[in-house]
Image (cartoon, rainbow, N blue to C red):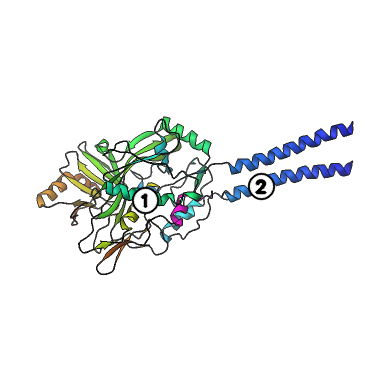
Amino acid sequence: MYKILKLPRFSASFFVSVMVMLFLIVGTVTANHFVYLVEDSARQPGGTKANFVFFQWYAGAFLPGDSYYKLRWAAQDATVKGYMDSAIAVWQTQDDSLDIDWHGWEYITGWPQSGANIRVYHGDCITVPAARACFIRQSWSTMGTQNAQFWHQADMYIRTNLNPGTTAVPSFFAASMAHEVGHSYGLHERYLEGPPASCNNSESTIMDANKITGSPSVYDHCDSISGPTTTDKNRIEQLPA
Amino acid sequence: MAKSKIIFFGVVLLLMLGAAGIGQIAKLARGQQSPVPTPSYPVHPDDQHWVDQLQELPFSPVPYEGAPILRPDPTIVSMSQAERQQLAETLRQSTTLVYVSGPETAGSKITVVGKEIQLPPDIYVKAYIEEVMCDPIPDLHCPETPIYGLYTLKEDAHVRVEANGDVYTFSRDTEAEIEQDRNTFQFVLDALDTELKIDPYKSESSQ
């Protein structure tokens, strides 16, 4: 009798233990984490309005019919489309160790494309003609219940004319566009504000500024890079995969 | 019999402890051992206070009352796939789209250096500029962000209102145009108790 009962008691306990163990292990390794950004309150329209600002991948998911995140973008001409294609590509090289979907970019035709989450303009930044590039917010989605804001649409501007007597390294405009794409992920400037703006020598990041060196002068990115660094990637996602 | 019971419960206990331990190890590997992982990169001295605040943020996808407002780097919180889908659906149903640039902003309120300014119905925010990238040219004015680019709906007058409260007219060729900007946006100058400044830079070509 004892031997008959012993086996089931042991098996049940063993089974429960194994199940608990499997639950804990499986529960941790299958979690698909998503990172959201918390934004500088000074850059929220009207000052502090929300506790959290999610970066824009959610905005892409707002459209009915989407099964996953898509960030739709449009370009004013072939030149800036080319720079943007390159910028997206270099950011996607950071994809391997990230949880978020970096492949959600979708180019859509037509200009001006009102359905785009990001529109890429070729020309002077509105109101700041001296800027090489700028990032303009068009609209937010707000959610009062969680006191959160999600940006929905933005415009990028890039100016590709250079000052007289200067040239640029081949990767200069690609770097400028990659910098703007960094803003679309929620990153801020990392250079020392001016006037004039100056390079940040404490780290290597695509969110740094430009530099002009040599004679005749040559435009280059402060860190002579054309895409994001590990530092940039870490800022977007702090949690390990 | 007593010995086999001890061995049996010992094995069960070890399995339980092992399971719990593996779970914790996995959590540690995912960075959940503390509310916020310590940044692995150099922190700019100007940002240190943000990092300090960050350490106080709980590990939770749901903002809590009194949560500090932080800069986006270092980034911090994660959500599971299920939470993400649920939130996306909630957002779809409950969010309100707010325009911060474009004609929809005519007659809205803007806030500059803590002062709220009511725009007239015929003036709008053409551009809410969050970031600018400037060329490192001596004497080139690189504005503080965020910037409000204010225009009349007819686009016959415009100014740039910078984060520090400076108001600039730009891309103007004549005194008459500058005067028109000054007159049209006098209410902004009054609200910010400042004078209209002139940005001398003119782009030769945008292409």
Which residue is rendered at x = 27% and y = 49% of the image? Answer: A79
Q: Is residue A236 magenta?
A: yes
Q: Secondary structure at mark 2?
A: helix
Q: Quadrant of residue A107?
A: top left
In the image, taking residue A60 as reference, residue A80 lies left or right, namely left
Does residue B53 appear in the picture of this structure? yes
Q: Position of residue B202 (x, y in %)?
A: 18, 55
In this figure, which residue is indicated by the disc labeled 1? A87
Does residue B112 appear in the picture of this structure? no
Q: Is residue B150 magenta?
A: no
Compute the Cα span from label 2 to label 1. Answer: 40 Å
In this figure, which residue is indicated by the disc labeled 2? B22
Rendered view: A59 above or below B134: above
Which residue is rendered at x = 48% and y = 52% of the image? Answer: B53
B131 and A166: which is toward the camera:
A166
B17 and A112: which is toward the camera:
A112
In the image, taking residue B49 as reference, residue A131 lies left or right, namely left
Highlighted range, magenta? A222-241
What secondary structure is the magenta-colored segment mainly? loop
Q: Amino acid at mark 1?
A: Ala
Q: Position of residue B140 (x, y in %)?
A: 24, 60
Marks 2 and 1 in Cβ contact (< 8 Å): no
Q: Name the subunit of mark 2.
A: B
